[in-house]
């Protein structure tokens, strides 16, 4: 003969099952609420970087410049030319090459360099680097110039 379990055991079992369901459900709700409570970080503020290159004599120069912040130093050093495009430009005393770019960290990455290469002529190349309208670096040389905030 079978007897029905006492009522208090059935209630305890029901309460145990309900509390397990409630705790599991609460964990999901708390985890979901926590994930949505933190907004994504704001994007870094971008700075206007203006590169200017000219020469005292009309000349075709090779110019390398940084127009993108590399994600980190390792990526940059692995292949710097990915982050440093090259252009050829005719410059002179009345003909400047000017480029505006936006960089998040110009103190680390802003850079422009110009060279006359292997030419025996000395066009006296100049560069100017300005960040947010303030000139932060200038350089000049007979065959090339490098403007950067960082020491390379």
Image (cartoon, rainbow, N blue to C red):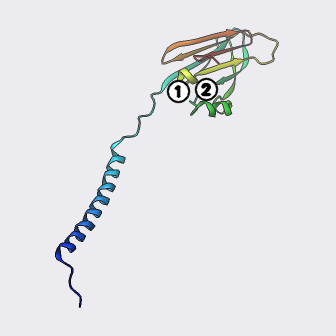
Rendering quarter of residue 11? bottom left
Q: Which residue is mark 1?
A: 103
Q: Classify 10 Å Cα crowding around label 2: few (below 14), some (14-19), many (20 and above).
A: many
Q: Position of residue 19 (x, y in %)?
A: 25, 62
Rendering quarter of residue 141? top right
Ranked by sequence position, the earlier of labels 1 and 2 is 2
Q: Residue sitting at 73 percent across and 9 percent down?
A: 142
Q: Position of residue 54 (x, y in %)?
A: 65, 13
**Disc 1 vs disc 2: Cβ atoms closer than 8 Å?**
yes
Q: Quadrant of the N terminus?
A: bottom left
Image position of 27 (left or right of 84)? left
Q: Which residue is mark 2?
A: 66
Q: Does any portion of residue 145 appear in the rendered image?
A: yes
Q: Position of residue 65 (x, y in %)?
A: 63, 24
Image position of 124 (left or right of 101)? right
Q: Which mark is residue 9?
A: none
């Amino acid at each position: 003969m079978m007897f029905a379990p006492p009522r208090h055991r059935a209630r305890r079992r029901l309460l145990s099952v309900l509390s397990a369901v409630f705790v599991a459900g609460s964990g999901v709700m708390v985890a979901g609420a926590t994930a949505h409570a933190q907004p994504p970080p704001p994007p870094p503020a971008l700075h206007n970087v203006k590169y200017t290159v000219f020469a005292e004599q009309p000349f075709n120069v090779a110019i390398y410049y940084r127009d993108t912040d590399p994600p980190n130093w390792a990526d940059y050093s692995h292949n710097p030319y990915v982050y440093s495009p090259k252009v050829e430009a005719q410059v002179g005393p009345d003909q400047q090459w000017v480029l505006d770019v936006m960089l998040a960290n110009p103190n680390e990455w802003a850079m422009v360099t110009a060279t006359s290469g292997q030419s025996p002529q000395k066009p006296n190349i100049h560069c100017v680097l300005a960040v947010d309208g303030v000139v932060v670096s200038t350089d000049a040389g007979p065959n090339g110039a490098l403007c950067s905030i960082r020491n390379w």
